[in-house]
């Protein structure tokens, strides 16, 4: 009887000790974000690194309070950049001088929201066109055009920051490199064309039987 009591109290005691030490560990971190950060493995210890894989692409940092990651830079792939090579005057002045008699940017048609919501000058200023502009006329660098999109598409923007919308480029190894909004959506016509699913190849299925 006595030995049973002894064993029982020993079991209870060790139980209490392990419980309290677990409890302490959990409280080292204020929330999961901090815990994940602290336990995160540094990318340098991986044999392959996404920065090596992306090669020559120049990257732009996206940094908020909660996440830091990289997106490919855009300016070098925008054909008519620098805009200021032609846009030496304001747009009304350029239009008035009508250099060629033809409309410039004839190939750009706005198919995004409605004209009462979005016009060329919602995103492009009428002067100093080498930057985009915000709704409140602040400059937005072409490499950070996601900031323009975020003004109206805040839920997609938040999903994108978290990694749920858009695409991670070059795998899951840190540092994180993601595609930017305009890497997938044409800002002038952001909707994807609908397409038919590719036809089921019945012949191949026959052959495999
Ligand atoms: C090769 C010369 C050239 C380049 C480069 C150029 N533009 Fe233009 N752009 C013009 C001219 C000329 C006009 C005046 C419009 C007209 O005469 O039809 C114009 C007009 C515009 C307009 C007003 C369109 C409208 O219908 O109100 C926007 C917006 C614009 N440009 C944006 C840009 C941006 C952004 C860039 C750089 C990424 C750029 N342009 C580069 C020549 C150019
Ligand atoms: C929703 C914002 C938005 C609106 C509205 C908009 N643009 Fe743009 N435009 C952009 C962004 C962002 C880019 C750069 C895209 C990239 O990084 O490839 C761009 C790029 C351009 C370029 C350079 C394209 C190239 O490949 O050389 C021209 C020219 C241009 N816009 C003219 C216009 C004109 C003209 C209008 C109105 C008909 C217009 N934009 C309306 C956001 C906008
Ligand atoms: C000033 C507000 C505004 C800005 C800035 C803006 N958008 Fe939009 N966008 C809209 C509105 C309004 C619609 C139409 C919404 C609808 O039909 O439900 C829309 C529609 C879209 C759609 C859905 C198209 C479809 O019909 O499926 C996409 C994708 C999109 N925008 C991407 C972008 C991207 C990328 C940028 C930045 C380059 C951007 N938007 C900037 C207001 C904006
Ligand atoms: C890797 C490509 C990719 C990137 C990057 C991306 N999107 Fe999208 N987006 C998509 C696809 C695919 C859809 C679904 C289109 C459909 O259903 O037709 C979509 C849908 C949308 C829609 C329409 C949502 C709806 O419910 O109809 C909006 C608005 C949008 N994206 C905005 C953005 C913004 C803003 C960013 C940047 C912060 C962004 N996207 C980045 C691929 C992308």
Image (cartoon, rainbow, N blue to C red):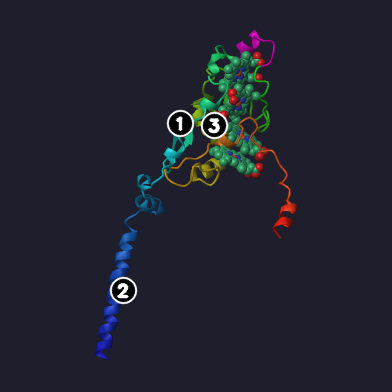
Q: Between tags 1 and 3, which lies in front?
A: 1
> What number is the disc on residue 148?
3
Which callout, 2 or 1, points at the residue further toward the start of the chain? 2
Q: Which is nearer the eye, 48 or 193?
A: 48
Q: Is residue 99 rendered magenta in the image?
A: yes
Which quarter of the rendered picture does the N terminus lie within?
A: bottom left
- Mark 1 sits on what residue? 58
> What number is the disc on residue 15?
2
Examine the rendered structure and indicate whether residue 190 appears above or below residue 34.
above
**Which element carries disc 2, helix, strand or loop?**
helix
Q: Which is nearer the eye, 71 or 18?
A: 71
Instruction: Please state the horizontal and vertical placement of residue 56, each as a whole percent of the image.
Output: 46, 32
Which callout, 1 or 3, points at the residue further toward the start of the chain? 1
Q: How many marks?
A: 3
Examine the rendered structure and indicate whether residue 190 appears above or below residue 208.
above
Q: Is residue 171 left or right of residue 41?
A: right
Q: CA distance from mark 3 to mark 2?
A: 56 Å
Q: Between tags 2 and 1, which lies in front?
A: 1
**Which element carries disc 3, helix, strand or loop?**
helix
Q: Which is nearer the eye, 137 or 132?
A: 132
Circle 2 Cα neighbour tier, 10 Å, few/some/many (<14 / 14–19 / ≥20): few
**Which element carries disc 1, helix, strand or loop?**
loop
Instruction: Please state the horizontal and vertical placement of residue 189, each as a whole percent of the image.
Output: 65, 32
Which callout, 3 or 2, points at the residue further toward the start of the chain? 2
Q: Which residues are magenta?
A: 91-103
């Amino acid at each position: 009887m006595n030995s049973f009591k002894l064993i029982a109290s020993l079991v209870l005691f060790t139980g209490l000790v392990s419980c309290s030490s677990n409890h302490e560990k959990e409280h080292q971190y204020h929330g999961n974000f901090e815990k994940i950060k602290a336990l995160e493995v540094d990318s340098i210890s991986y044999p392959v690194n996404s920065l090596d894989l992306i090669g020559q692409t120049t990257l732009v940092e996206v940094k908020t309070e909660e996440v830091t990651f990289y997106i490919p830079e855009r300016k070098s792939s925008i054909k008519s950049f620098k805009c200021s090579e032609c846009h030496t005057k304001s747009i009304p002045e350029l239009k008035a001088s009508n250099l060629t008699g033809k409309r410039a940017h004839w190939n750009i048609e706005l198919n995004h929201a409605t004209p009462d919501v979005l016009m060329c000058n919602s995103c492009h200023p009428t002067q100093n066109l080498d930057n985009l502009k915000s709704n409140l006329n602040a400059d937005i660098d072409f490499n950070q055009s996601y900031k323009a999109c975020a003004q109206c598409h805040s839920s997609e923007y938040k999903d994108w920051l978290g990694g749920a919308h858009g695409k991670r480029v070059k795998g899951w190894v840190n540092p994180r490199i993601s595609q930017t909004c305009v890497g997938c959506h044409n800002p002038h016509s952001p909707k994807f064309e609908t397409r038919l699913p590719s036809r089921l190849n019945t012949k191949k299925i026959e052959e495999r039987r």
